[in-house]
Amino acid sequence: MPGIWIITEHKEGRFKKITYELLSQARKFKEKIGEEVCALLLGSNIESLANQLGPYGADKVYLLEDEILKNYTNESYTQVIAGLAKFNSPSILLGGATAQGKDLLPRVATRLGTGLATDCINIDLDEKNFLNITRPIYAGKLLIEATIPQSRPQMAMLRPNVVEILPQDGSKKAEIIKSKPDLKKEDLKSFLKEILKGESKEIDVTEAKIIVSGGRAMKDKENFKILEDLANAFGEGTAVGASRAAVDSGFALHDIQVGQTGKVVNPTLYIACGISGAIQHLAGMSTSKYIVAINKDPDAPIFQKADYGIVGDLFEVVPLLTREVKKLRAEG
Amino acid sequence: MNIVVCLKQVPDTETKIILNPDSTGILTEGIKWVMNPYDEYAVEEGLKIKEKFGGKVTIVSMGPDRSIEAIRTALAMGADEGVLLNDPALEGSDSYATALVLSKAVSQMEYDIILTGKQAVDLDCSQVYAGLAEFLNLPYVSVVVGLELFPDQKKAIAKRETEGGEKELIEVSLPAIFACQKDLNIPRYTSLPGIMKAKKKEIKKLGLADLCLNPEHVGKAGSKLKTGKYFLPPQRKAGIKIEGEIPEATAKLVKLLREEAKII
Amino acid sequence: MEQVTREIFWNVGGVRLIVYLLALIPVFLFIYGLWEKIKLWRIGKKENRYDQVWKRIKSTLYNGILQVRNLEKAFPGTFHVLIFWGFIILFIGTVIIFLQEDITLPIFNFNFLQGNFYLWYSLILDLFGVLAIIGVLLALYRRFFLRPESLENKSEDFLSLYWFLLVLLTGFSNEGLRIAATNPDFERWSFAGWQIASGIKSLGMDLNSILTLHRINWWIHLLLAFGFIGYISYSKLLHIISSPLNIFFRSFEPIGLIKPIPDLENQETFGISKLEEFTWKDLLDTDACTKCGRCQDNCPAWTSSKPLSPKKVILDLKAHLLEKGKLLLQKKELSPEKNLIGEVILEDELWACTTCGACMRFCPVTIEHIPKIVEMRRNLVLMQSKFPPELNLFFKNLENNYNPWTIGFATRADWAKDLKVKLFSQDKDIEYLYFVGCSGSYDERVKKVSKALVNIFNQANLNFGILGQEEFCCGDSARRIGNEYLAQILIQQNIETFKKYNIKKVIVSCPHGYNTFKNEYPLFGYEIEVIHHSELISDLIKKGKLNLNKKLDQIVTYHDSCYLGRYNQIYDPPRRILKSLSLNLKEMELSKYKGFCCGAGGGRMWMEEKLGKRINQMRIEQAQDTGAKIVATACPFCLTMLEDGIKEKEIKNIQALDLSELVELSLQK
């Protein structure tokens, strides 16, 4: 039977943002092809979450609860989802291009013998009402379009932060279909032993989505605090980095050094404060999606690579920036 | 232990990627081909496992003739044998077909553990290892940043990187597939004697018939995902220096970050 | 008239036979010890140092006899010359006696040691004897009062000096006693002996006492002298033989030249990891060392507190040769096995070297430090894959993109996009290749130098072009780090390109490129005329092809690049340029052949500097000391390092500029 299915993701009793983005995307498809939107909710003791999905656009919620599903593993989730999909034959099955999604959907797709597009930055419906996806390749240097003309369901992973979440409609309620999956612990070959939280709140520069980096102009170890403040103002997934000059001068430790002899990073936003942009540093961050440069010297090479630059004293600019960012984020 | 490492030859990440005239692919002249960087971690891990537990490391790669060089690099690092899955019909295979082809080759071998990179940096699909696991009916762990093996107990504990600095410890029974991530290890630099020896090691070539496959299973025909047009992303605008006094400029910057860059 | 001569063996009786028999002992010891040493040197591999014999003889006269290089350090050089000539003259004096006594007199009945000849003989011997004593005393003064850091004071060091002093002193007391006893007037010519004799006579001793004293003194002197000869082969005195020998067998290659690995494809091992893999000349080097410490004193690594001392490397090899060599000769193994790299010489020592060549330039006995270090690096890199981890990415970048940074090779000519520059792939008729180099192509700061040069070339209507994407790294850093395989790939590719376009002349703005193309590419099979941009610009100025409108009235100091200066003796063209720009040139103390390295050579540009002081900061301090507002450079590495030094120290009143940039400033209206 037709259907636009999405795989929800939740953690510690709350849905992750991608779930709402997927539902919004599914709603857009529904407007065009009229099939119902179904959300797959797997886990243990998560019934209360099921009701939240209706207002965001889910017509149905397949609620699959089991102690075994308490912690995600690709094995157990694949079994449940693939089984359900095989039985119901939806037209479309979407997930997020997240850690879980990338781990799960490829196996599901192979089991269902269907096509899957990773990390889509745009999903449309073409004239035949089939999925037409756009995704980046060669680290984003090129984009390609792709379709899944024959096999079903058509599967795709949506990149987070690309689809705008449509406003809720509190009046909408989803039909909740509960079932207990047919899983036996003995049959499973993998299980989660332990979750290791990050050691400190700070994540590694190589993992950060936003990096605020300081150079020699920081003048002192203590002054790196203003960079931390700015990083924190952006929220989670941020880190503080340093240029080699700063590390050599003892202002920062080597493990946050960005550059050819330090770490190579690829964040969405790289803010270089008082960094001149020597070639060895650029080699470590030039693939950043957006680069902001703050430097007193208008001729600093970093301005050649920056998308946005401010010529000024970082000690003036950075605290102001922190304030502005906090203000804007609070507005939501 | 019999260790199988699947790798792919890809363009170097710094190579200029140019669209071909009819937007159906890229120009291949002037491209520097290298072993997929993530696969280097897989090869290194395989070599470390061999050094610890003994055994041999076999490299498997699906690709055109030039892919032999990537296999040779792995041999120069210390791998023992190489197998190239090479046939004109294989060209254009998507992740599903590629996983199928690899599974046919690997199922002909003895293996205790299979290692791959978590994604190939050309098409960035990050799907093949899962497909391979499915076809071979094996468990797998992706984005592995730590790996501990207990061969006598036929199990392994892998450290998987998730999001926000968190990691998971996954226990899995062997044989299994591990898709390697950066920082799992530091790939060794090939020694010159290693490079010389590798030139003499034999690399087997397998075609469709050897893999018991028919043309409709592989290549474009066997792909579930059909690729369409290739095109350039919207050009990165030239950078701008934001004018104005500092408070003004800062406010403008934040606005741009929200509206243009969509970061805040 | 009394015979103007002296009786040999006077007063000591018919001891001739005993003396000659006794003499056999030190002679035997000397030869035996020397032979043992030669056997140890021969453990090393073959090397052809037997060519250009006449040149070798001249060189030995120059540095071995005239000791020109030794005298570069005036004080120790001078007193060594005194000791050296004292020893030689006195030795010749003794040989003359032997000649007379045992050859000319008995065989030809010819007595020449008499008359005027004898007078001059006595004078000269006394003179040089006194000079030798002065020399030894000055040496002792330096060693024990001045106590320079470069001298350790082991027992063999003062034993050698004291012993020689005693031989000299007892020689004089001998003469004094004899003259006091025989009292011939002509012996005034032996002025020192004469004074001593006067002193003895004033003591009022009777003749018998003098005679007895003389006999005793004579034997003491004889035994001391014989002992001294015997001691030579077993102490640092061996340098009497080994140093001139080392100078004779010296390398005439340019400083720091490293030979390619022959037949790379078919070798089993690469580089040196064992004592016996050195050549015999390498091993001779270790015994030629007199521990003078000049290599260490002038080594930028040592003076910036890195663990590397070139002196220590040579002496550690010497100790290792003694230890392991003896066993090898007996076909035994060293047990427990001692690793050459890691135990005898530490890896940190090897990596600290900037290959600046100061050690080799200052060594009075032409020891070759750099090739040994690089050979050991080769082993670390090619065989063991053991090297500072930051080099992993460096190698990968060279392999994949033919430049040391992770930047696509396709963008190599982007810097010249908007400039009037010809490309060899598009133009047929180009006279000069301008080999831009990696820094000049990719580094933002150094691109300014490339652009300035292009400006200058165009002003002078020079017919030049660049290779653009076809230009690969020259291979210098890879070679110095020891990755000969990678370097060969780059070099062979460049040679193919040079052949393709039939390139005969190349202009470089980088001394490392200069050195590699000039001195090393021929070894890989391609000869090419290489011109450094300072030479070219100096020439253009001389020919009046550049309108140097603006007079730059500033105090400037010039930093000699090691690979331009010490390696290739190009000191003047840069200075001529600065003078013609009306700059007030103030030289640093460590300039020209004494130039202090910026710290980037030897591949160190690509490694972290974790230990000791920052070499580049030390150099910029030296520049500041001249009062200069500008430090001029002729090398992208030096420019980068000095600018970094300026930034690190937050100095406001000095800036680093390349020669081409200064010239460009002057070309402006």
Image (cartoon, coloured by chain):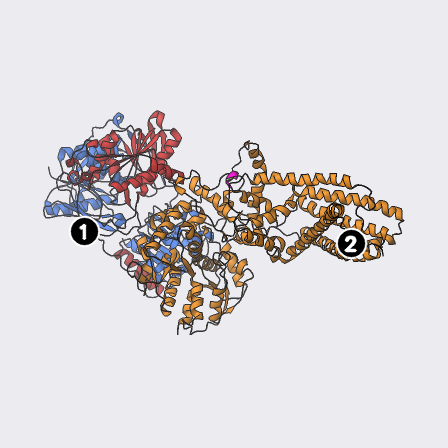
Chain colours: A blue, B red, C orange
Q: What type is the residue that disc 2 sits on?
A: Gln
Q: How dense is the environment of label 2, judged by Cα within 10 Å: few (below 14), some, or many (20 and up)?
A: some
Q: Which residues are magenta?
A: C272-278
The subunit letter for the residue under badge 1 reads B
Q: Locate residue C358, reporting x and y percent.
A: 53, 54
Instruction: Using the rendered image, report if marks 1 and 2 lie on a common chain.
Output: no
Q: Locate residue C366, reporting x and y percent.
A: 56, 51
Picture quadrant where residue B131 is located: top left
The residue tagged 1 is B23
Asked if residue C224 lies left or right of residue C605, the reply is right
Front of the two marks 1 and 2: 2
Residue found at x 27% / y 25%: A186
Q: Nearer the viewer, residue C225 or A331?
A: C225
Q: Locate residue A104, reporting x and y percent.
A: 24, 37
Reply yes or no: does residue B100 show up in magenta.
no
The residue tagged 2 is C114
In the orientation shown, which residue stands out farthest toward the front?
C108
Q: Locate residue B34, reporting x and y percent.
A: 31, 44
